Amino acid sequence: MEMHHNIQGWSFFFYLCICGAICESFLYSVPEEKKSGSLVANVLKDLKVDVRELSARRAQLVSEGTKKYFQLDPHSGNVLLNGRIDREALCGQKDPCIVLSEIVLENPLQVHRMEVEIEDVNDNSPQFSKKDFLFEIPEQVPMNTRFPLETAQDSDKRENAVQNYTLSPNDHFRLDVQSHSDGTNYAELVLQKPLDREEDSQHFLILLAVDGGTPRRTGTATIVIHVLDTNDNFPQFGDSVYKVKLKENTSRGTLVEKVEATDRDFGSFGELTYSFSQVPENVLKAFSLNKHTGELTVAGTIDYEEERNYEIRMKATDGGGLSDYCKIIVEVEDMNDNIPEVTLTSLTSPLTEDSPLDTVVALFRVTDADSGDNGRTACTTEAMLPFVLKTSVNNYYQLVTQQPLDRERVSEYNITITATDWGSPRLTSTRIINVQISDVNDNAPVFEKSLYDMQLHENNIPGLLIGLVQAKDLDTEQNAKVTYSLLPEKVIDQPVSSYVFINSETGNLYVIQSLDYEQVKVFKVTVRAVDSGFPPLSSEVMVRVVVMDENDNAPFILYPLQNGTSPSNDLVPRGAEAGYLITKVVAVDRDSGQNSWLSYELLKATEPGLFSVGIHNGEVKTMRPINKRDTFKQKLIIGVRDNGHPPQSTSAMLSILLVDGFSDPYMKMVDIPKEEVVEEEDRTLTMYLVICLAVISFIFLVSMLVFIAIKIQKRRKFIESSALSFPVGPNFPENCGDVDAGTLSRAYNYEVCLAGGSLNSEFRFLRPFFPVFSVEPAQSQQDSRISSSSQEVPNHAAEGQVMSELCLHTSSSSAIWIVDMNGNAPKFYEINPNYLYPQDSLVPRTSGKCIPLFT
């Protein structure tokens, strides 16, 4: 059976040689017991390679078993011993003792079979199983009767094994040395002279076993012969040879075979005992024999891989010392009791994630110590992995990549290699191969948001942190280190770097200068994130910075204009009822939102209960009818406050004159329905100004002509009569008046005439049909955080003075009101025959002529 398996192995080896994978088989020899590091052979010549090629092709020496007895020096090609080798411990009784190894060369793959024969040295002496051997021989044994002796055991082989036996000199026995079919020698004791118990009942002989080594070693045993009385029948076995099949791994105590011998003698000469005869030590370890029944049972481990058959010699001895011999041949049947073994030859780890397909990751071999189908193996790996197994020669496998690798998805693989044999039941073994995936820079930084919105309050502190932009890189180490920068852009014709700064490591965004909402409400910057890999990868994101408004601007009074000159005056007839609209305060705020919501309030008034101010529209109205006791000159201070936090405020001063004797047209003008006022206010400002400018210019020219004509006419009438009444002239239609009771400035024209001896005067009051607006640009504020401000208007005198005329026709003193055409407040003048006093100034009187007054 052993020869059959050897033939199969050599046939498979020959097939691989034909295929080209295994080129040659090398045979070397080395004596046992040589020290570690001793040279076995140099394989460069046999491999037909040089030292450089041997290293480049990653030459390896792979042993058949798990223990490595040899090692290959890739720099010299020498095969060296890994340690001392005991041939007897390694191979036991096998001869020759061959250690199989394989030399594996890569790129291309070549496998060379190397057989190393362990040569025996004479390091063991022959030994008998016991020191004394007892023979009981009847005295009537015929001449030349042979008595087989137990062979001496020598662990050495060939010439170092037992070669001869010698017997101490005696008269009755001689020694005959013969050989078995397997070549081993054995000795038989031959009776050459009849025994006589009465002469000598015991004989003591010395048996000497001599081996053939140098120097020779010997072993001795004592043969004790007891001469018995006559026993003329020998035990007899039924067969001389028994053949038995036994499965390996059979449990201890299992009956292997029962042999029986018979003896026709009676009494003690017919009682038989069974024993082993000339059996090696491995038989004694594996089997036991019942000396009374002849039952052969299993006593040790039966392993097909260690011993495939046993030859057991048995002896049956009667009470008279006569024996018969037989042989039991036990053939061990192989069982699938060895799992496949996976031996890793090479491994590439870590493996870069950009490795191409079919990259060899690992090279390993699968072996099974069983034979036949039990020793055939198949190897598989897990599914759904980017790796695949490729079968190579002589049970070698290559683990190669079959899909692209991505370290960011899977950073390492624990690949389970499963090896299964074809036995029954099938046995399986696994081995886990850990493959680390190394990183390459294949991922650009990714921002957490596609657009960042950040808010910042105006008037900020320079260097204030606005927010954080952050990008993540799925790579590792240096490839994942991200730096930030701003792309060169402009914000209101200035580089973006003058507004914001970004920390290149943290992504913190800082504002460099203090911002003003009224100048910059929103701006955008582009941030770029770049990793530190090679080549570097980058991404960009837009950051929108919104400047939040703060209440840093006080309200600004548009009307009435506030300047260093005298405040504007508004006339109110004493006959005005409650709710009479006097004027309207108009203000604006440069802030936005609720910071620009304005509210009006009356801070101070000459008579607090007389006037009110609309909290939302700034309209100044009378709260009650005006009576004669009210002071004719009223001063109001109106406060304007925004809705910010903290609130900002400013104030405006109004002067109101309470006058008597307004003509009917003026009174009717006051009673204009509100629907008409609303209708006029709904017009657009642009169209309104254009129409007003054209109409005022036209009316001004007509009024001047009418005014000159009336003055000439009235002067003639005064000369003719000293007592005249002054009715309303035809040139002043009753419907004339201002269609808008608004609060903007208006032009007035008064004509004052005095009758002789009268202290009363009548007024002719002319108005334009449309209001005249005085629109002037607002002056920029010097300090936006001043809670209140004073505003000035240009001096009317600088724009061009408008002249009023005063005509005097009496010698008596009179007190009159005079209003100029500029729309200023009325002034009080006291007139005497010689002088005219406008306030504190003296103006010489010109008798009979109109004195021009400039205000």
Image (tube, rainbow, N blue to C red):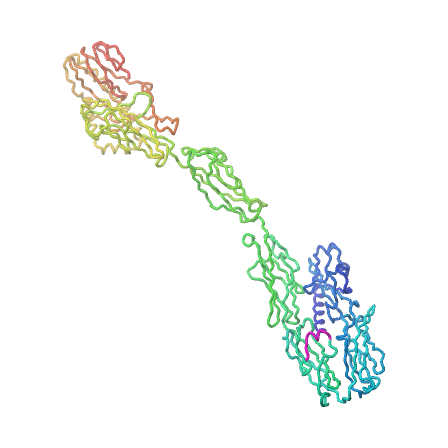
The quarter of the displayed image where residue 704 is located: top left
The quarter of the displayed image where residue 677 is located: top left
Query: Is 122 drawn above or below residue 476 in the view shown?
Result: below
Asked whether 631 falls inside the magenta stretch, the response is no
Comparing 764 with 462, the one in front is 462
- The answer to whether one can see residue 238 in this image is no
Comparing 560 with 846, the one in front is 560
Name the spot of residue 384 as percent of width and height, x first: 55, 60
Query: Is 209 drawn above or below residue 636 in the view shown?
Result: below
Q: Quick one: quadrant of the N terminus?
A: bottom right
Name the spot of residue 244 as percent of width and height, x first: 68, 80
**Region of the chain picked out in magenta, as a range:** 280-289
The quarter of the displayed image where residue 675 is located: top left
Name the spot of residue 348 as percent of width and height, x first: 63, 55
Name the spot of residue 77 as percent of width and height, x first: 75, 57
Q: Quick one: quadrant of the C terminus?
A: top left
- The answer to whether one can see residue 253 in this image is yes
Comparing 52 with 300, the one in front is 300
Looking at the image, residue 60 sits to the left or right of residue 544; the answer is right
Query: Is 508 drawn above or below residue 800 in the view shown?
Result: below
Looking at the image, residue 138 sits to the left or right of residue 330; the answer is right
